[in-house]
Image (cartoon, helix red, strand yellow):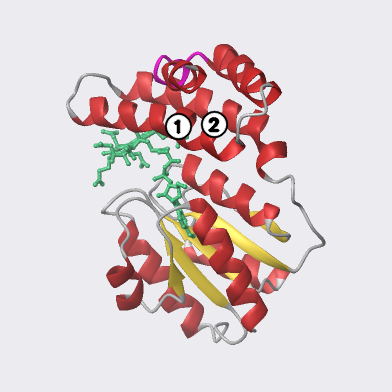
Amino acid sequence: MIFDEISLSIQQGKAKDARRLIEDALNQNLNPKDILNKGLIRGMSIVGEKFKRNEVFVPEVLIAARAMNQGLEVLKPALVANKIEPIGKAIICTVKGDMHDIGKNLVKMMLEGQGIECIDLGVDVSYETVINAILEHKPQLVCLSALLTTTMLYQQEIIREIEKANLRNNLKIIVGGAPVTIDFANEINADGYRADAASAAELAKELIESL
Ligand code: B1M
Protein backbone atom coordinates (compact mmCIF):
# COMPACT_ATOMS: atom_id res chain seq x y z
CA MET A 1 0.00 0.00 0.00
CA ILE A 2 1.37 3.40 -0.97
CA PHE A 3 0.67 4.93 2.48
CA ASP A 4 2.97 2.30 4.05
CA GLU A 5 5.63 3.04 1.44
CA ILE A 6 5.42 6.77 2.20
CA SER A 7 5.63 6.03 5.93
CA LEU A 8 8.70 3.85 5.34
CA SER A 9 10.40 6.50 3.19
CA ILE A 10 10.01 8.98 6.07
CA GLN A 11 11.29 6.45 8.63
CA GLN A 12 14.31 5.75 6.44
CA GLY A 13 14.85 9.45 5.74
CA LYS A 14 14.65 8.92 1.97
CA ALA A 15 13.49 12.36 0.89
CA LYS A 16 13.66 11.64 -2.84
CA ASP A 17 11.53 8.50 -2.45
CA ALA A 18 9.08 10.34 -0.22
CA ARG A 19 8.61 13.09 -2.82
CA ARG A 20 8.14 10.59 -5.65
CA LEU A 21 5.69 8.42 -3.69
CA ILE A 22 3.63 11.45 -2.66
CA GLU A 23 3.48 12.58 -6.29
CA ASP A 24 2.33 9.04 -7.26
CA ALA A 25 -0.32 9.08 -4.53
CA LEU A 26 -1.60 12.47 -5.70
CA ASN A 27 -1.68 11.21 -9.30
CA GLN A 28 -3.81 8.29 -8.06
CA ASN A 29 -6.24 10.90 -6.68
CA LEU A 30 -5.76 9.69 -3.11
CA ASN A 31 -7.02 12.10 -0.45
CA PRO A 32 -4.19 14.52 0.54
CA LYS A 33 -5.28 14.30 4.20
CA ASP A 34 -4.92 10.50 4.09
CA ILE A 35 -1.48 10.88 2.46
CA LEU A 36 -0.55 13.21 5.32
CA ASN A 37 -2.01 11.22 8.22
CA LYS A 38 -1.56 7.61 7.07
CA GLY A 39 1.77 8.21 5.30
CA LEU A 40 3.87 11.14 6.52
CA ILE A 41 2.64 11.59 10.10
CA ARG A 42 2.45 7.82 10.67
CA GLY A 43 6.08 7.50 9.55
CA MET A 44 7.24 10.30 11.83
CA SER A 45 5.33 8.83 14.82
CA ILE A 46 7.14 5.51 14.33
CA VAL A 47 10.46 7.42 14.28
CA GLY A 48 9.35 9.13 17.52
CA GLU A 49 8.56 5.80 19.20
CA LYS A 50 11.94 4.36 18.15
CA PHE A 51 13.69 7.54 19.32
CA LYS A 52 12.06 7.13 22.73
CA ARG A 53 13.25 3.51 22.97
CA ASN A 54 16.79 4.55 21.91
CA GLU A 55 16.50 2.46 18.75
CA VAL A 56 17.32 5.50 16.59
CA PHE A 57 19.25 8.67 17.48
CA VAL A 58 19.25 12.38 16.64
CA PRO A 59 20.99 12.06 13.21
CA GLU A 60 18.40 9.53 11.97
CA VAL A 61 15.58 11.69 13.33
CA LEU A 62 17.01 14.76 11.59
CA ILE A 63 17.17 12.90 8.28
CA ALA A 64 13.58 11.70 8.75
CA ALA A 65 12.54 15.28 9.55
CA ARG A 66 14.18 16.51 6.35
CA ALA A 67 12.28 13.89 4.34
CA MET A 68 9.06 14.91 6.13
CA ASN A 69 9.55 18.64 5.41
CA GLN A 70 10.36 17.94 1.74
CA GLY A 71 7.35 15.64 1.48
CA LEU A 72 5.13 18.33 2.98
CA GLU A 73 6.28 20.77 0.30
CA VAL A 74 5.08 18.35 -2.40
CA LEU A 75 1.77 17.87 -0.60
CA LYS A 76 1.23 21.55 0.18
CA PRO A 77 -0.58 22.61 -3.06
CA ALA A 78 -3.08 19.76 -2.62
CA LEU A 79 -3.60 20.46 1.09
CA VAL A 80 -4.26 24.15 0.55
CA ALA A 81 -6.16 23.74 -2.73
CA ASN A 82 -9.20 25.50 -1.35
CA LYS A 83 -7.18 28.68 -0.87
CA ILE A 84 -9.37 31.76 -0.68
CA GLU A 85 -8.96 35.53 -0.32
CA PRO A 86 -6.99 36.51 2.83
CA ILE A 87 -9.22 36.93 5.88
CA GLY A 88 -6.48 38.00 8.29
CA LYS A 89 -2.90 37.76 9.37
CA ALA A 90 -1.12 35.46 11.83
CA ILE A 91 2.31 35.31 13.36
CA ILE A 92 3.52 31.75 13.86
CA CYS A 93 6.60 30.30 15.53
CA THR A 94 8.10 27.55 17.62
CA VAL A 95 9.05 29.05 20.98
CA LYS A 96 12.47 29.72 22.48
CA GLY A 97 14.62 26.68 23.24
CA ASP A 98 12.70 24.51 20.79
CA MET A 99 13.95 23.53 17.31
CA HIS A 100 11.01 21.32 16.23
CA ASP A 101 9.40 22.85 13.15
CA ILE A 102 7.42 20.17 11.34
CA GLY A 103 4.16 20.64 13.28
CA LYS A 104 4.55 24.42 13.06
CA ASN A 105 5.06 24.19 9.27
CA LEU A 106 1.95 22.04 9.01
CA VAL A 107 -0.14 24.49 11.02
CA LYS A 108 1.15 27.29 8.79
CA MET A 109 0.08 25.40 5.67
CA MET A 110 -3.39 24.77 7.05
CA LEU A 111 -3.75 28.42 8.10
CA GLU A 112 -2.83 29.50 4.57
CA GLY A 113 -5.44 27.05 3.31
CA GLN A 114 -8.03 28.94 5.41
CA GLY A 115 -6.96 32.22 3.79
CA ILE A 116 -4.84 33.42 6.69
CA GLU A 117 -1.59 35.17 5.74
CA CYS A 118 1.29 33.85 7.87
CA ILE A 119 4.38 35.61 9.11
CA ASP A 120 6.65 32.70 10.03
CA LEU A 121 9.22 33.66 12.68
CA GLY A 122 10.83 30.21 12.59
CA VAL A 123 12.06 28.23 15.59
CA ASP A 124 13.67 29.14 18.93
CA VAL A 125 11.75 32.41 19.06
CA SER A 126 11.93 34.78 22.04
CA TYR A 127 9.10 36.94 23.36
CA GLU A 128 11.01 40.04 22.21
CA THR A 129 10.91 38.78 18.61
CA VAL A 130 7.19 38.01 18.89
CA ILE A 131 6.44 41.46 20.33
CA ASN A 132 8.47 43.22 17.62
CA ALA A 133 6.65 41.21 14.97
CA ILE A 134 3.24 42.13 16.46
CA LEU A 135 4.21 45.81 16.38
CA GLU A 136 5.48 45.53 12.81
CA HIS A 137 2.82 43.32 11.21
CA LYS A 138 -0.28 44.01 13.36
CA PRO A 139 -1.69 40.45 13.11
CA GLN A 140 -5.05 39.31 14.50
CA LEU A 141 -3.53 36.03 15.66
CA VAL A 142 -0.37 34.65 17.29
CA CYS A 143 0.26 30.89 17.02
CA LEU A 144 2.78 29.31 19.39
CA SER A 145 4.07 25.78 18.93
CA ALA A 146 6.13 23.80 21.50
CA LEU A 147 7.19 20.16 21.37
CA LEU A 148 9.07 19.82 24.63
CA THR A 149 7.68 19.72 28.15
CA THR A 150 10.38 22.24 29.06
CA THR A 151 9.63 24.74 26.26
CA MET A 152 5.83 24.63 26.55
CA LEU A 153 6.31 26.79 29.67
CA TYR A 154 7.77 29.52 27.48
CA GLN A 155 4.39 29.84 25.74
CA GLN A 156 3.16 31.29 29.03
CA GLU A 157 6.04 33.74 29.17
CA ILE A 158 5.27 35.01 25.66
CA ILE A 159 1.58 35.48 26.56
CA ARG A 160 2.51 37.34 29.78
CA GLU A 161 4.90 39.65 27.93
CA ILE A 162 2.32 40.37 25.20
CA GLU A 163 -0.10 41.36 27.97
CA LYS A 164 2.52 43.47 29.76
CA ALA A 165 3.15 45.31 26.48
CA ASN A 166 -0.62 46.01 26.24
CA LEU A 167 -0.86 44.23 22.91
CA ARG A 168 -3.57 41.72 23.80
CA ASN A 169 -6.50 43.86 22.60
CA ASN A 170 -7.85 42.66 19.25
CA LEU A 171 -5.30 39.86 19.27
CA LYS A 172 -6.00 36.16 19.75
CA ILE A 173 -3.37 33.65 20.82
CA ILE A 174 -3.49 29.91 20.19
CA VAL A 175 -1.06 27.32 21.48
CA GLY A 176 -0.31 23.76 20.43
CA GLY A 177 2.27 21.00 20.14
CA ALA A 178 2.43 17.41 21.39
CA PRO A 179 2.82 18.05 25.17
CA VAL A 180 0.27 20.91 25.28
CA THR A 181 -3.26 20.23 26.59
CA ILE A 182 -6.47 22.21 26.76
CA ASP A 183 -6.04 22.54 30.54
CA PHE A 184 -2.57 23.97 30.11
CA ALA A 185 -3.82 26.37 27.42
CA ASN A 186 -6.55 27.62 29.80
CA GLU A 187 -4.08 27.89 32.66
CA ILE A 188 -1.74 30.14 30.66
CA ASN A 189 -4.62 32.28 29.39
CA ALA A 190 -4.41 31.33 25.71
CA ASP A 191 -7.51 31.95 23.59
CA GLY A 192 -7.44 28.43 22.24
CA TYR A 193 -5.73 25.09 21.75
CA ARG A 194 -6.17 22.31 19.23
CA ALA A 195 -4.34 18.98 19.02
CA ASP A 196 -3.82 18.95 15.25
CA ALA A 197 -3.00 21.39 12.49
CA ALA A 198 -6.29 21.17 10.59
CA SER A 199 -8.40 21.83 13.71
CA ALA A 200 -6.02 24.63 14.73
CA ALA A 201 -6.62 26.33 11.38
CA GLU A 202 -10.40 26.04 11.77
CA LEU A 203 -10.14 27.56 15.25
CA ALA A 204 -7.88 30.31 13.89
CA LYS A 205 -10.52 31.24 11.31
CA GLU A 206 -13.27 31.31 13.97
CA LEU A 207 -11.16 33.49 16.28
CA ILE A 208 -10.23 35.97 13.54
CA GLU A 209 -13.88 36.20 12.47
CA SER A 210 -14.91 36.82 16.10
CA LEU A 211 -12.80 39.99 16.33
CO1 B1M B 1 12.69 15.81 19.25
N1 B1M B 1 11.66 15.23 20.81
N2 B1M B 1 14.16 16.35 20.42
N3 B1M B 1 13.67 16.12 17.62
N4 B1M B 1 11.33 14.87 18.36
C1 B1M B 1 10.28 14.77 20.58
C2 B1M B 1 9.30 15.93 20.66
C3 B1M B 1 10.09 13.69 21.74
C4 B1M B 1 8.63 13.48 22.16
C5 B1M B 1 10.77 12.36 21.30
C6 B1M B 1 10.62 11.24 22.31
O1 B1M B 1 11.30 11.21 23.29
N5 B1M B 1 9.71 10.35 22.03
C7 B1M B 1 11.00 14.31 22.87
C8 B1M B 1 10.31 15.30 23.81
C9 B1M B 1 10.10 14.75 25.18
C10 B1M B 1 9.40 15.75 26.04
O2 B1M B 1 9.77 16.87 26.19
N6 B1M B 1 8.33 15.28 26.63
C11 B1M B 1 12.08 14.97 22.03
C12 B1M B 1 13.37 15.29 22.53
C13 B1M B 1 13.67 14.84 23.93
C14 B1M B 1 14.32 16.00 21.76
C15 B1M B 1 15.73 16.44 22.17
C16 B1M B 1 15.85 17.01 23.60
C17 B1M B 1 16.64 15.21 21.95
C18 B1M B 1 18.08 15.37 22.31
O3 B1M B 1 18.77 16.23 21.81
N7 B1M B 1 18.50 14.53 23.22
C19 B1M B 1 16.08 17.50 21.10
C20 B1M B 1 15.62 18.91 21.51
C21 B1M B 1 16.09 19.96 20.53
C22 B1M B 1 15.39 21.27 20.77
O4 B1M B 1 14.31 21.50 20.25
N8 B1M B 1 16.00 22.12 21.58
C23 B1M B 1 15.25 17.01 19.96
C24 B1M B 1 15.60 17.19 18.63
C25 B1M B 1 14.89 16.74 17.56
C26 B1M B 1 15.38 16.83 16.11
C27 B1M B 1 16.12 18.13 15.81
C28 B1M B 1 16.31 15.66 15.86
C29 B1M B 1 14.05 16.61 15.32
C30 B1M B 1 13.34 17.93 14.92
C31 B1M B 1 13.59 18.29 13.48
C32 B1M B 1 12.61 19.35 13.00
O5 B1M B 1 11.55 19.58 13.54
N9 B1M B 1 13.01 19.98 11.92
C33 B1M B 1 13.18 15.92 16.35
C34 B1M B 1 11.98 15.22 16.04
C35 B1M B 1 11.66 15.07 14.57
C36 B1M B 1 11.14 14.67 17.03
C37 B1M B 1 9.92 13.73 16.87
C38 B1M B 1 10.48 12.34 16.55
C39 B1M B 1 8.90 14.09 15.83
C40 B1M B 1 8.29 15.50 15.97
C41 B1M B 1 7.46 15.78 14.74
O6 B1M B 1 7.89 16.49 13.86
N10 B1M B 1 6.28 15.13 14.65
C42 B1M B 1 9.25 13.82 18.32
C43 B1M B 1 8.52 12.54 18.72
C44 B1M B 1 7.03 12.63 18.44
O7 B1M B 1 6.45 13.68 18.41
N11 B1M B 1 6.42 11.49 18.33
C45 B1M B 1 10.32 14.37 19.13
C46 B1M B 1 5.39 15.25 13.47
C47 B1M B 1 4.57 16.54 13.58
C48 B1M B 1 3.57 16.62 12.46
O8 B1M B 1 3.88 16.47 14.82
O9 B1M B 1 5.09 18.49 15.78
O10 B1M B 1 3.51 17.07 17.21
P1 B1M B 1 3.88 17.64 15.91
O11 B1M B 1 2.68 18.57 15.39
C49 B1M B 1 1.34 18.10 15.47
C50 B1M B 1 0.60 18.56 16.72
O12 B1M B 1 1.41 18.65 17.86
C51 B1M B 1 -0.03 19.85 16.29
O13 B1M B 1 -0.20 19.74 14.87
C52 B1M B 1 0.60 18.70 14.32
C53 B1M B 1 -0.27 17.60 13.72
O14 B1M B 1 -1.25 18.07 12.86
N12 B1M B 1 0.66 21.11 16.54
C54 B1M B 1 -0.06 22.24 16.79
C55 B1M B 1 1.97 21.44 16.53
N13 B1M B 1 2.12 22.73 16.75
C56 B1M B 1 0.91 23.26 16.91
C57 B1M B 1 0.50 24.58 17.15
C58 B1M B 1 -0.88 24.83 17.27
C59 B1M B 1 -1.80 23.80 17.17
C60 B1M B 1 -1.42 22.50 16.91
O15 B1M B 1 -1.38 26.06 17.48
C61 B1M B 1 -0.52 27.17 17.49
Query: Where is 110 relative to 49, above or below?
Result: below
Query: Where is 72 relative to 163, above or below?
Result: above
Q: Position of residue 15 (x, y in %)?
A: 55, 17
> Distance of mark 1 from mark 2, alpha carbons?
6 Å
Query: Where is 25 relative to 184, above or below?
Result: above
Is residue 3 shown in magenta?
no
Query: Where is 62 relative to 175, above or below?
Result: above
Q: What's the mark number on residue 35? A: 2
Seen at 55% across and 87% down, the residue is: 166
Seen at 60% across and 35% down, the residue is: 31
Secondary structure of the residue carrying tag 2 is helix
Is residue 12 shown in magenta?
yes
**Furthest residue toward right:** 85
Q: Determine the image quadrant of residue 192.
A: bottom left
Residue type at numbered disc 2: Ile
Seen at 72% across and 59% down, the residue is: 117
Q: Position of residue 103 (x, y in %)?
A: 48, 45
Contact (CB < 8 A) between labels 1 and 2?
Answer: yes
Q: Is mark 2 within 8 Å of ligand 1?
A: no
Q: Determine the image quadrant of residue 81.
A: top right
- The residue where tag 1 is placed is 38
Q: Residues within 10 Å of mark 2 (few under 14, many from 20)?
A: many
